[in-house]
Image (cartoon, rainbow, N blue to C red):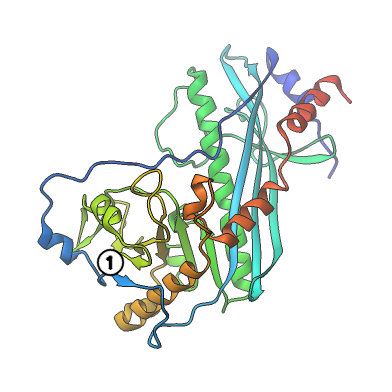
Amino acid sequence: MGKKNFRKKLESRVNKVYDSVEGEVEELLNQLNSPDLPGYDTTKEKMSRLHPEEKITLMDDAWEKINLSYFIDGTVKTLKVGGVEGSDNLYYPISLSQVVAAAVSCMDGNKFCKNTAIEKLYILLPNIFQLGFEKEEIYSMCGYDWFVDDPLSGKTVEKKEVDVADFMALRRKSITRARWLMRQSERELVTSIFKQDRNKWIVRDGTLFDISIQTAAERDMSNIIGLSKTFTLNPWVEIDGKREQIGYIQKLVRNLKIGYRSPVYKLIPEEGREEKYTYMWFLRLHPSRFSPFDGVLKVEIPPHVIYKDEKYRVNTINGISHAIWNWRMPYDCDIRRNVTFLYPIRVAENAAKSLTFSIEKMNGIWMAEKSGS
């Protein structure tokens, strides 16, 4: 397939192309510090627990021995490089986005190697069909292949309709779309590793719901773990066979002792989709430093049929918690995020970021297209 020139086609389809490079804020996920819901029922709190709190610093003979083998993290860099005035006289932003998902493996104690990575480049342009482009078309810029993608036509974490006349809303949509594309690359990496090495444990930085591993099609994946440094404090869980929102997680996390895992819950975030759930608990790795929630990870495993056995489930959960405890980052680090990092996840993050372009390079690629070089 011959290489197509995105810039030339774009200029032939719109009234004018504007070049205005501006870096976007990226990879910022804020802790949702919602307050405890008033007057929660302590009876319901106990009913929602599948397994009670437990100390996990010392391995118990009854627990499953868990060796965490693969660690996956992703990164995305999105840069607004300009905009176009379409034939409808509306102004649409153009963004370049680089999405990377990387996996590192640990098969021999503490020796790491970069197992594999998925890297994709996107040109994000709203209303591409109106402008004469097709989704997933590939264009060459400075020797790199770039996929054209429309933030308005695909999925994002947001489900609200966007006013196409609202330029800032379109920019936000591009950012959320890029993050969704990153999660899809992580999902692709997880499934690829699982097919190659079905018996090894895989750890993904982030909730399993981001990569849809909790759905029925992937329920043969029993050995995937989701770790989240940020999380909602009033999640929806199963209580006495019903989906209800609980407001006592903030108090639970605040009082969780170092080296303990919290009670285990059945997490069901989507209304009407009770079949989409994970087993969720919290684990305190370090004392609080900057907020009551520092040093705490949310942990998830998928709804595999083997976890229907309560004894096996709790022994696996405790084995996972103990393995995570052993991989925690040192506490004597001044970087805030490190108190909830696992060392291998930090290695995976660095592997992903090492593949990303600089802002200056992305700008240069776009401006080189303008000059026709």
Q: Position of residue 82 (x, y in %)?
A: 66, 20
Crowdedness near tag 1: few (<14), some (14–19) or many (≥20) residues, C-alpha within 10 Å = some
Q: In this view, does 240 lie to the left or right of 282?
A: left
Farthest-out residue, bottom: 61
Q: Position of residue 32 (x, y in %)?
A: 35, 41
**Residue of label 1:** 263
Farthest-out residue, front: 332
Q: Which residue is drawn at 28% across and 64% down?
A: 265
Q: Where is residue 28 in the image (x, y as percent from the top left)?
A: 50, 38
Q: In which quarter of the image is the C terminus?
A: top right
Q: Residue at x 49, y 42 (%)?
A: 155
Farthest-out residue, right: 373
Q: Is mark 1 on a helix, strand or loop?
A: loop
From this viewpoint, is residue 231 visible?
A: yes
70, above or below 1, in the image: below
Instruction: Name the amino acid, label 1.
Output: Pro
Q: Which residue is drawn at 81% across and 25% down?
A: 369
195, above or below 364, in the image: below
From this viewpoint, is residue 218 visible?
A: no
Q: Position of residue 27 (x, y in %)?
A: 54, 40
Name the foreground residue: 367 vs 355.
355
Q: Is residue 369 left or right of residue 349?
A: right
Q: Which residue is drawn at 73% across and 39% down?
A: 357
Name the foreground residue: 159 vs 113.
113
